[in-house]
Image: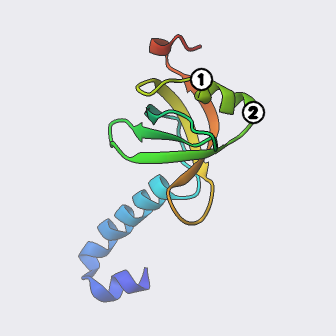
Amino acid sequence: MFLISVLYPQSATKSLYEAFIRDVHLFGDKMSTTDTYTVTSEQNDHGCVTVRAHPRNATFHVVDYADESDRERIGDLPAGSVVKLELSRAGRRGNVWCAESVHTAHTDGGE
């Protein structure tokens, strides 16, 4: 906050701080809500699935799962399937994520 105060006038500090907090909330260690994703690459031999977020179009590489049933559930989905995921970071670097929960969408015969 001190750096923002030094670089920007006081009137802009609050809006910059609010934008910073919003970004930390979206891209912190754990996403706070379950979001909808489209499977863009089916699960490979290493268990990695690539998904695209709606409506942001951000891409995530899911490499770890909360349990084996989640791994199997998403592993059965073909590319183009819609799935609801809750993601948390799988590491400090890179775009790798852990699926804390996996729910297939109704359009894919899901629950």
* Relative vertical location of residue 8 with respect to residue 66 in this rendering, above or below: below
Residue type indicated by callout 2 = Glu
Q: Mark 1, mark 2: which one is toward the viewer?
A: 1
Using residue 90 as the reference point, say whether residue 82 is left or right of it: left
* Relative vertical location of residue 64 with respect to residue 71 in this rendering, above or below: below
- Which of these two is toward me, 35 or 77? 77
> Residue 27 location in percent, x, y?
47, 56
- Tell me how far mark 1 sits from mark 2, CA to CA: 12 Å
Quadrant where the C terminus sits is top right
Residue type indicated by callout 1 = Asp
How busy is the neighbourhood of tag 2: few (under 14 within 10 Å), some, or many (20 plus)?
few
Q: Which sits earlier in the primary sequence, circle 1 or circle 2?
A: 2
Which label number is shown at residue 68? 2
> Residue 38 location in percent, x, y?
42, 31
Residue at the top extreme?
109
Residue at the right extreme?
68
Q: Quadrant of residue 15?
A: bottom left
Using residue 83 as the reference point, say whether residue 8 is left or right of it: left
Which label number is shown at residue 76? 1
- Which of these two is toward me, 17 or 63? 63
Q: Secondary structure at mark 1?
A: loop
How busy is the neighbourhood of tag 1: few (under 14 within 10 Å), some, or many (20 plus)?
few
Q: Secondary structure at mark 2?
A: helix
Task: Say whether marks 1 and 2 touch (CB < 8 Å).
Answer: no
Residue visible at 56% across and 35% down in the picture: 43
Residue visible at 41% across and 57% down in the picture: 22
Residue visible at 33% across and 42% down in the picture: 57
Using residue 38 as the reference point, say whether residue 73 is left or right of it: right
